[in-house]
Amino acid sequence: MKKILILIVMAIFAVSTPAVWAAKDRPGASDKAFEKANENAKFKKDPKWFDDKGKKAEDELNKAEKDAEKAKKKTEHEAKKKQKEAEKAKRKAERDAEKANRETERNRIREQKEAEKAKMEKQEEAEEAKKNAEKKSGEMKKKMRKGLGQ
């Protein structure tokens, strides 16, 4: 068992070692690209591989375009937001007006019912007063007849 374990460790070591040596002996992918770079390449064979010629003006122009686009989107967004707020206020005003109309209608109906009730009560009182008056007049007639008849 120990022999098998030792063989496995040695095999792993043997397989990994050439990869480590290759990095030291031969150039890697970035080294090859650096060697093959010509004067028209994006990066040149100096530590400052970036090209500053015209970049600042382009960057400023691109930034200005991006800023203008951003400002445009912002104004559009604000306009949409204000439009939504206006629509919301309009809906609220419509709901309030509708609520007020319903309340007014309820009050009108309530007053109408109260007026009808008061009218009915007056009619009932008038009828009751008429009955009482008839009753009193009937009693008076009886008294008068009794008084005359005696």
Image (cartoon, helix red, strand yellow):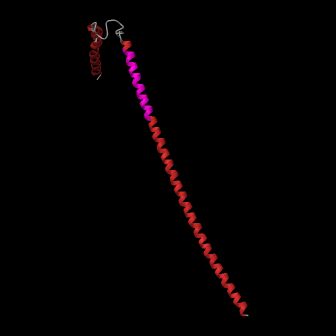
Relative vertical location of residue 147 with respect to residue 23 in this rendering, above or below: below
Q: Quadrant of residue 146?
A: bottom right
Task: Say if 68 sits above or below 149 in the image.
Answer: above
Residue 104, position as x, y percentages in the image: 53, 55
Taking the view exactly as shown, the residue that stands out farthest to the bottom is 150
- In this orientation, which residue lies closer to the viewer: 11 or 70? 70
At 38% across and 16% down in the image, what residue appears? 59
Q: How many marks?
A: 0
Residue 110: name its quadrant: bottom right
Q: Which residues are magenta?
A: 58-80
Name the spot of residue 26 as percent of width and height, x first.
27, 9
Above or below for 34 versus 126: above
Placement of the C terminus among the 4 image quadrants: bottom right
Residue 6 drawn at (x, y percent): 29, 19
Foreground residue among 124 and 150: 150
Could you tell me which residue is drawn at 28 percent across and 20 percent down? 8
Magenta: main secondary structure: helix
x%, y% of residue 136?
67, 81
Say which residue appears at 73% left-offset and 90% top-offset.
147
The residue that appears at 61% across and 70% down in the rendered structure is: 122
98 or 13: nearer the viewer = 98
Judge left or right: residue 121 versus residue 76: right
Instruction: Check the picture and name the quadrant holding the N terminus.
Output: top left
In magenta segment, residue 67: yes
Residue 111 colored in magenta in the image:
no
